[in-house]
């Protein structure tokens, strides 16, 4: 059986006096990307916070790479997070007075790596991600697209199995958005990680293997599955659907994969 990066079930979460998630399920494997869309204030960022162990849910189980987050003590959680999760935010959130390579090396330095190793790894990653030329530039002068590439390098520097990105293209024009999407959604194939992206933008969501919509506290699978790629009977599709380990627990006939409701998924 494939080991899962994410194995979430029964997730119920409240914030600001509202229930944002009710009995949500989410599974994902290495090499897979998931986009989460939904109205403003529906709880998408809070979902990411739950996955990172930064927001404790009211109910449910969140396992990330086999670790049940409920068992993590706060002191251990930070070190676990550093090893396990890379974050990409809307504006890159780089330290503007540090160079690109210094920003990308930070998680490694915090993790206790020596300067030579940290800077060497960061410089290689910047090269791989197409921003080697600006490695020594101050982060504050980078373009939006460059900034996000450096932010992705920083997120990847400790080689975490899970990358969480919250509106990573929200501050970019359409060209830079395409560019950053190609990079971000290409990471699972290149680095065998799992990428979860929260976005308002359906164009961005379209890049993902799986698309979820959070609305009225329910996480729907809104992926359009290409059933023509399979020559199996419809009943078998729930077993053989693309990247079958992300399972979202929806029985909504409007949003479930074709064949899934007939199969009782
Ligand atoms: N720690 C908190 N304390 C109080 N309210 C919170 C907290 N975290 C989130 N909320 C509230 O929960 C709701 C969902 O917030 P969240 O940021 O998760 O939504 P979102 O879908 O990411 O929104 P947007 O797309 O606008 O960024 C909001 O009404 C927000 O004010």
Image: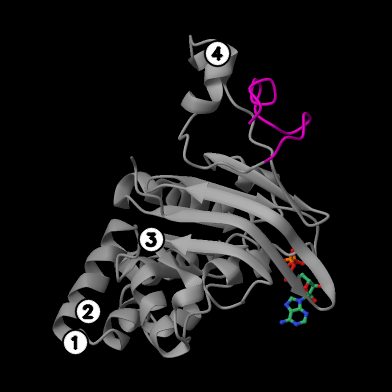
Residue 66: give its label.
Answer: 3
Check if mark 2's residue and mark 4's residue have beta carbons within 8 Å: no
Q: Which of 71 and 208 is in front in this view?
A: 71
Dot 4 beta carbon under 8 Å from ligand 1 = no
Nearest-to-viewer mark from 3 and 2: 3
Residue 115: give its label.
Answer: 1
Residue assigned mark 4: 228
Disc 3 to disc 4, C-alpha distance: 34 Å
Q: Sequence-wise, which precedes: disc 1 or disc 3? A: 3
Q: Sequence-wise, which precedes: disc 3 or disc 4? A: 3
The percent position of residue 153, horizontal first and vertical second, equals 36, 67
Disc 2 to disc 4, C-alpha distance: 47 Å
Q: Sequence-wise, which precedes: disc 2 or disc 4? A: 2
- Give the side of residue 39 with respect to residue 154, left or right: right
Check if mark 1's residue and mark 3's residue have beta carbons within 8 Å: no
Callout 1: SS: helix
Q: Sequence-wise, which precedes: disc 3 or disc 2? A: 3
- Which quadrant of the figure contains the C terminus? top right
Q: Does the magenta stretch include residue 79?
A: no
Q: Which of 179 and 110 is in front in this view?
A: 110
Callout 3: SS: loop
Is residue 6 shown above or below 75?
above
The percent position of residue 211, horizontal first and vertical second, equals 62, 43
Q: Ligand 1: which quarter?
A: bottom right
Q: Residue placed at 66% from the left, 67% from the top?
A: 59
Check if mark 3's residue and mark 2's residue have beta carbons within 8 Å: no
Nearest-to-viewer mark from 3 and 4: 3
Residue assigned mark 2: 119
């Amino acid at each position: 059986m494939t080991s899962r990066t994410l194995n979430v079930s029964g997730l119920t979460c409240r914030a600001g006096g509202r229930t944002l998630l009710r009995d949500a399920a989410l599974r994902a494997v290495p090499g897979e990307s998931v986009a989460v869309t939904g109205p403003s204030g529906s709880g998408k960022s809070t979902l990411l916070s739950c996955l990172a162990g930064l927001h404790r849910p009211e109910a449910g189980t969140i396992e990330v790479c086999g670790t049940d987050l409920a068992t993590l003590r706060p002191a251990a959680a930070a070190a676990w997070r550093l090893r396990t999760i890379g974050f990409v935010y809307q504006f890159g959130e780089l330290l503007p007075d540090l160079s690109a390579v210094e920003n990308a090396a930070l998680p490694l330095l915090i993790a206790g790596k020596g300067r030579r190793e940290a800077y060497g790894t960061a410089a290689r990653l910047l090269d791989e991600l197409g921003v080697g030329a600006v490695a020594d530039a101050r982060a504050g002068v980078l373009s939006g697209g460059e900034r996000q590439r450096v932010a992705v390098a920083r997120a990847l520097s400790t080689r975490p199995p899970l990358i969480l990105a919250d509106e990573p293209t929200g501050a970019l024009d359409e060209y830079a958005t395409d560019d950053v999407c190609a990079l971000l959604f290409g990471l699972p194939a290149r680095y065998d990680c799992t990428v979860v992206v929260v976005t308002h933008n359906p164009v961005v969501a379209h890049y993902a293997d799986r698309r979820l919509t959070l609305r009225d506290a329910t996480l729907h699978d809104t992926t359009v599955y290409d059933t023509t790629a399979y020559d199996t009977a419809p009943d078998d599709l729930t077993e053989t659907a693309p990247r079958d380990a992300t399972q979202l627990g929806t029985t909504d006939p409007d949003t479930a994969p074709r064949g899934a409701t007939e199969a009782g998924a």
